[in-house]
Amino acid sequence: MRFALISALKDLRRLRRDPVALGLWIGIPLFIVLLMYAMFGRGETKPQGRLLVSDEDASLLSGLVVGSFRQGPLAEMVQVEKLPREQADRQIRAGRASAWLIIPKGFGRAVLRNEPTRLTLVSNPAQRILPGIIQETVSVMVEGGFYLQVLAGEELRTLAQGPAPGATAMPDATVAQLSVRFNRLGQKLAGWLDPPRIQLATEVRRPGSATQVNFAALFMPGMVFLVLLFVAQGLSADLWKERLRGTLRRVRTTPHSTLSLLGGKLLAAALVFFAASLAGLGCASLVANIRPGSLLPGALWSAAAGAVLFLLLALIQLYATSARAAHILANIAVFPMMLLGGSFFPLEVMPESLARIGRWTPNGWALVQLKAMLAGTVEPARLAAAAALLAGVGGAAFLLAARRLRTFAL
Amino acid sequence: MIEVEELRKSYGELVAVNGVCFAVQPGEVFGLLGPNGAGKTTTIGCISGLLTPDRGRVRVMGYDVRKDGVLARRRLGLVPQEVALYEDLSAGENLAYWGGAYGLRGPLLRERIREALELIGLEEYARRPVKSFSGGMKRRLNFACGILHRPAVLLLDEPAVGVDPQSRVRLLEMVREQARAGVCVLYTTHYMEEAEALCDRLGIIDRGKMVAQGTLAELRAMLGERDLLRLSGSFPPDAVRQALAAMDGLEIIQADAAVMRLALFDGPRRLSALLAALAAAGAEIRETTLTQPSLESLFIKLTGKELRE
């Protein structure tokens, strides 16, 4: 056991002395992650628009119109900014906003008196979705104004007329009369508005266990496995380096078995895989909504899967007849695994026939479990079965590799 | 001590070692001398437990290498033919790793590393990566990694190949120091001078067979203190053999159309008469080399070829 630790430490030191190789193994997938971060940003991909408002009326009603964009889900999509007409005009011409709403002077009074008025909405032709949303919202408000006039037009007009000339306030009788009529109107509408006659039920359909929050989240776990494949291939190729250098033969003349030697290599590889997975998933959490609690279990699972990948690739190295043959064979194994196993193209975007094959590649199978863990949809029994299978395959590969290593070293 | 009895190892049809027997005592340097492919490395492989012999028995300090492999290997130190070091690690880290492989740790390991670096003259290079070392420095470090745990038996498989003369002298001196300290040393080489200078006893191995063994004096006695004469030119075989048959104390070791090797007593004095007899038999002699009795001449006598052929 102690020799395994010494060997692991030696391999980690050697890896540290070869930063170029380590940088390439980890750097290429990390570069792709950063590229995606730049493309898709953080979290869910909600559109963010800028609505310019030139409120020349500055009345209670115009304030309500502006305020409607600052409430509910609309507030997450639209950023409202009040600007004078000239400045807003310059901004919209420069394409720096999604739309520009002009509320003319006298808008509030006209609405209350049921007189014609005009709201002007200028949209940015370079954008399609957000100006459309803003236009729909304004249309709904205009329609709401129409129905309010139908239901309470007289009361609104009374309010708009205000006190009689020379008086500072409305007569108490008029105020009381308006209050009673508004109260009755409220009672009449209550049956329609509270509770609402139409309720919107939202249901998110999750595609199987591989739940994805956004496009970036589709790629990130696969990228982690891309790193693991690269690192596993590089570390397993070290067996040939050690053989050609004669250090394997020398180890065989010490009192230790090849089990200890391979155990050391496996331990070093597992530590590298764990660090790379934790860093990779940490980076992934920046661009995809991964539950923080799933990072550590996810990294542990990835490290274990990476260790088994290392052992499988080590078997290829150990049974190859030369270092060159080993390199070619490892590439023949790794590239299809990478492309089919969801490490480059997510399984979710593949044609089902290919995805089905991909889910049965070693990395694809492990990736499906990882995604379920990250999404919090993995069942304990299923995870236990997967872990047992991983341990079984890993154990068998380890024993076979240790046995082969005895003659390989010569 | 090392005891090798009737050792045989083959690779398919090729018999690499066949019936080799020898023993090496503590404090003794036993040289295994032979050309490339003679079976030296295979013999070392069988002793160190790397290879499983087809037949025969190998014991290291009384432990059978096959039955008590771990116990035997604990007492062994191997300096392999290749520089079996991690070039990206420093000299100190290499020593720490190989020392750790034999159970050294903590202050004892650090002390041994310090001593080893001092012994091989690399104290100032302890933290430098091995890849920056010269060939001689690597060879010395390779040696130090094999003796760090102070083995009772030291196997050196052509450790001085490709080493500059200065480093070679230093390396040989370090081997002698090991023997003086009571270590049982098995040293393989195909350099005659090394074997003559270093070894207490020698075994001459060729094509997997031990053709002779003994001290240098014993081996020279086998040659009968005769000189070795090498002639090159053109020799009518039958006429030459007939001419030489009449001369006393002369043995034909090799005779073909272009090269002749002869062992004879009192060579310098008899040379002119010999050349005259050959000329009379129709030989055309272009080059003559007369060598005093040595391991080289013994090797040629025993195997019919030069060591570096």
Image (cartoon, coloured by chain):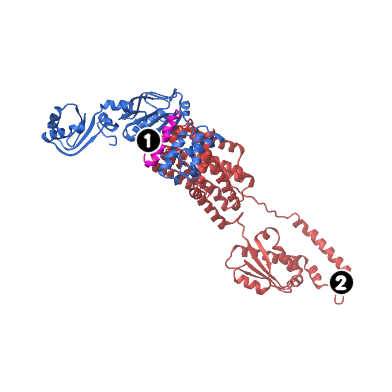
Chain colours: A red, B blue
What residue is shown at x 84% (from left), y 66% (from top)?
Answer: A178
**Is residue B193 toward the left or the right of residue A302 in the image?**
left
Q: Which mark is residue B158?
A: 1
Residue B173 magenta? yes
Q: Measuring 78% from the left and 57% from the top, which residue is drawn there?
A: A190
The chain carrying label 1 is B
Please determine whether, in this image, residue B258 is positioned above or below residue B224. below
Residue sitting nearer the eye, B9 or A372: B9
Q: Secondary structure at mark 2?
A: loop
Q: Main secondary structure of the magenta part?
A: helix
Direction from residue A324 to residue A173 in the image, left or right: right
Quadrant location of the C terminus of chain B? top left
Asked if the magenta segment contains residue A367, the reply would be no
Residue A111, position as x, y percentages in the image: 74, 70
Q: Quadrant of the N terminus of chain B?
A: top left
Residue B262 visible? The answer is: no
* Residue B17, percent from left and from top: 33, 28
Under mark 2, the amino acid is: Ala
In three-dimensional space, the C-alpha distance between marks 2 and 1, rounded to whole angstroms, equals 117 Å
- Which segment is the magenta one? B157-182
Q: How many marks?
A: 2
Residue B231: x %, y % from top left = 19, 36
Residue at point 72%, 64% (across, down): A67
In the image, residue A144 lies at what x, y percent? 71, 64
Residue type, mark 1 in image: Glu
Any part of residue A30 in sight: yes
Q: Which residue is mark 2?
A: A169
| Quarter of image, res A86 | bottom right
Are callouts 2 and 1 both on one chain? no
